[in-house]
Image: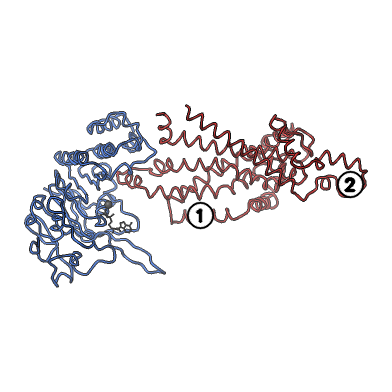
Amino acid sequence: MRHRLGFAGKKLIRMALLLLGTSLAAFLLMAASPLDPLQTNIGQAALGSMTREQVDRLEEYWGTDTPPMERYLGWLGSALKGDFGTSLLYRRPVMEVIGQRLGSSLWLLLTAWTLSGALGFVLGLAAGANRGRWPDKLVRGCCLVLSSAPVFWLALLLLMVFSVWLKVLPIGLAVPIGAEAASVTLAQRLRHALLPALALSISGIAGIALHTREKTADEMERDYILYARAMGERHILLRHVVRNVALPAITLQFASIGEIVGGSVLVEQVFSYPGLGQAAVSAGLGGDMPLLLGIAVVTAALVFGGNLTADLLYGAIDPRIRREAAKR
Amino acid sequence: MTPILTAESLSVSFTRYGRGLSRVELPGIRDLSLTADPGQVTAVVGSSGSGKSLLAHAVLGILPRNSRMEGTLLYDGAPLSPRRAAALRGREIVLVPQGAGCLDPMMQVGPQIRRGRRGPEVRTQCRQALERYGLGPETETLYPFQLSGGMARRVLIASAVMEGPRLVVADEPTPGLDARAAGRLLSHFRELADQGAGVLFITHDLELALTVAHKVVVLYAGQTVEEVPAEGFRTEKGLAHPYSQALWRAMPRNGFQVLPGLQPEGLDLPEGCAFAPRCPGRRPECGRGQIPYIETDGGRARCLFPGEVSVS
Ligand SMILES: Nc1ncnc2c1ncn2[C@@H]1O[C@H](COP(=O)(O)OP(=O)(O)O)[C@@H](O)[C@H]1O
Ligand SMILES: [Mg+2]
């Protein structure tokens, strides 16, 4: 028990440090950005025609008149109390904006994450079990192409094929244009999220598949596989290999949440999908410091949560760790 | 009595692709001949790389894909085709491997030795097999990392005897065991033979082999160089091949005299007798042509001058 508490304590301290570091890095990058929030949001011409007081008030609103360190510490002080401020672009509390955006991103992320994990695992298993033969060559070739194709390029390609040429799927957004929020059906939401989810999953498959292939090929060489064959066992792949490859694959899958979240920024941009990624881009370009810091903290917490889950699962699944822990 | 296993001029080679389109045939074992009788422990002795594991894998029909097998392999008097081997392995022909490393680290012992078969009778069989080697039912829920070296061997041998095998192939089952545990393990093999099974006991440890074996087959560079009743190893005189004699002299109780030089491997095989370069009694004829495997008192030897060269 004491061991468990120590583990949790260490993880919590790490998380706090990570969130602090992320917010500081995001802040510094933003503060060093050459984009002037006033100019980008109000426009050069409009600014020129304003009086000094009007400009002063705008500077105060966008926070550009405060020295950076003071500004960050101010944000940090309220954030520690749970107040993440108000989004300057959306004029609503940051957490409310994030909550809504995350809501529409979440299931895009979830679909992509599950799909890429499952497909990548199966493909990697098939390739690794047939190392050097055609299934392996096929899977490896596809993975190399996929992993060297940028995700936004994939997204554009899908968009061109399915929305522009075949016209079977909508070109963007999360709901039909002009539809009222309450009248949107689940089917419509699904149709709108299909392409972005597909683009996002495809880009995630390669990593999982190649990793699983490597592990599978290694396991196939192990003595226990030869012994199982010697004793006339059937279904060795399902009985033994999957069991041994699943653990590292699951760990990688949870650790890959960061990549999916990162990829979603680009994919949402291409499909004009109003999710968290798109909000991050607008916040970054529009100088919305509170929103950007909020998003940075929330995504960092998501990624950290993924890694933590991976660690915990490892302990729960691997008998070597589980039994050792039970002994204590 | 029909031998349970007969190998006649068995060879296993590997194809390697070199630069460009060139292909090389790497010999693993060649000219391997032996017989193993039911009710007997036949020890196969040879140093590392002499082809012992390949022999085991050939018998079980699990040679790697890039290998080619030639010669004859008979099981119970009939050819042991890959298909027949596949049908028999795990039941009539079983393997006792080296150690716990041959168990799936993520699977409990019980399901592992039941090998995917279900049903109450399989469970009983499994429990009885474990019990026979002094392992309680709680062993079934252990993972391989929880087994000691000796326990792991007993699990492996229990797994082998579950279905009453007729040929037990044990490929170096003793490394890492202390003398007492190794002795106990060997007595289990002897017991299996006494109950009628043929046991092919593969080892590099001649001294250990002699404690249980009825017959010893000596391998050198992928060939059988001598097949002799275990009594032959009581004195140097009982042995026909100079390599067997060298093995005898290298045993601790006979003075620990180790023969200098190394066993040739792969493509470095010399013309004629493979042992000639190290043989104290080599003659010019030994470096030419094929050396026949000839009958000696009670056995066979691959030497042009069997029993002649002994120098002490
Ligand atoms: N898959 C393989 N490919 C090429 N050569 C092999 C392969 N397996 C074994 N060999 C060769 O066959 C010879 C005999 O190997 P092995 O039967 O494992 O020896 P032992 O079990 O007696 O130590 C060795 O020289 C080894 O290099
Ligand atoms: Mg070996």
The image quadrant of residue B183 is top left
Q: Please indicate whether residue A189 sits to the left or right of residue B218 in the image.
A: right
The image quadrant of residue A295 is top right
Give how far across and how far down residue A319 sits, in percent.
Answer: 41, 35
SS for callout 1: helix
Give how far across and how far down residue B181 sits, in percent.
Answer: 22, 39
Give how far across and how far down residue B188 sits, in percent.
Answer: 19, 39
What is the chain identity of the residue bearing mark 1? A
- Toward the viewer: B289 or B71? B289
Q: How is the image coloured?
A: by chain
Q: Which mark is residue A214?
A: none
- Toward the viewer: B246 or A295? B246
The image quadrant of residue B192 is top left
Q: Is residue B260 above or below residue A2?
A: below
Instruction: Kindly identify which residue carries mark 2.
Output: A47
Q: Please indicate whether residue A225 sits to the left or right of residue A77 in the image.
A: left
What is the chain identity of the residue bearing mark 2? A
Residue depicted at x 51% and y 33%: A7
Instruction: Kindly identify which residue carries mark 1.
Output: A140
Q: Amino acid at mark 2?
A: Leu
The hue used for chain B is blue
The hue used for chain A is red
Residue depicted at x 78% and y 45%: A286
Task: Specify the farthest residue to the top.
Answer: A1
Disc 1 residue crowd, few under 14, some 14–19, many 20+, Cα 10 Å: many
Q: Amino acid at mark 1?
A: Arg
